[in-house]
């Protein structure tokens, strides 16, 4: 993500760079003209990014493709992880059958859906007693 933002500002810097030396101009008209030209060019570049929905812009697309290439999961890794998940599911199922009945969504320690524990119930705040 930071690479994409860097590319956007790099493109804007390219068109705004000529106005950086406008301070040295003696003529206020040429100074304002340089600033206005840079502003108009920056707006043009921003419009190009918006029209391309950022991700389809010629300077952003290669960054996204490179990111996907570096962070992709290979088929071998996927198969290995898939195997680990199926092993864990088997262990969980065998452990549940050892303990007796497999609990369903309706079964809660307090006895009903109205008292079902939510993720917030698992949070423990030191100043309060645990649930």
Image (tube, grey):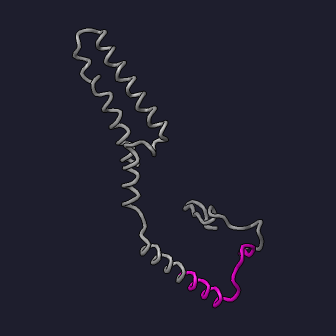
Q: Nearer the viewer, residue 93 or 121?
A: 93
Q: Which residue does the image show at 37% across and 26% down from the upper left?
A: 41
Q: Nearer the viewer, residue 14 or 21?
A: 14
Q: Which residue does the image show at 44% across and 37% down from the upper left?
A: 49
The x, y position of residue 61, in whole percent, is: 40, 48
Task: Answer above or below: position of 51 versus 102.
Answer: above
Task: Answer above or below: position of 99 versus 65.
Answer: below
Residue 103 in the magenta stretch? The answer is yes
The x, y position of residue 76, in whole percent, is: 42, 75
Task: Answer above or below: position of 90 versus 64.
Answer: below
Task: Answer above or below: position of 64 versus 22.
Answer: below
Query: Relative to residue 93, is residue 29 drawn left or right?
Result: left
Q: Which residue does the image show at 74% across and 76% down from the upper left?
A: 107
Q: Nearer the viewer, residue 32 or 75?
A: 75
Query: Relative to residue 3, is residue 123 drawn left or right?
Result: right
Residue 46 in the magenta stretch? The answer is no
Q: Which residues are magenta?
A: 88-108
């Amino acid at each position: 993500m930071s690479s994409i933002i860097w590319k956007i500002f790099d493109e804007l810097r390219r068109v705004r760079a000529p106005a950086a030396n406008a301070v040295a101009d003696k003529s206020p008209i040429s100074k304002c003209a340089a600033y206005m030209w840079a502003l108009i060019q920056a707006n043009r570049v921003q419009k190009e990014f918006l029209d391309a929905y950022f991700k389809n812009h010629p300077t952003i697309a290669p960054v996204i493709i490179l990111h996907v290439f570096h962070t992709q999961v290979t088929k071998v890794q996927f198969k290995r992880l898939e195997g680990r998940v199926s092993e864990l599911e088997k262990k969980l199922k065998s452990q549940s059958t050892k303990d007796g009945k497999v609990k369903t969504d309706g079964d809660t320690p307090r006895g009903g859906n109205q008292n079902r524990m939510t993720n917030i119930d698992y949070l423990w705040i030191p100043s309060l007693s645990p649930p």
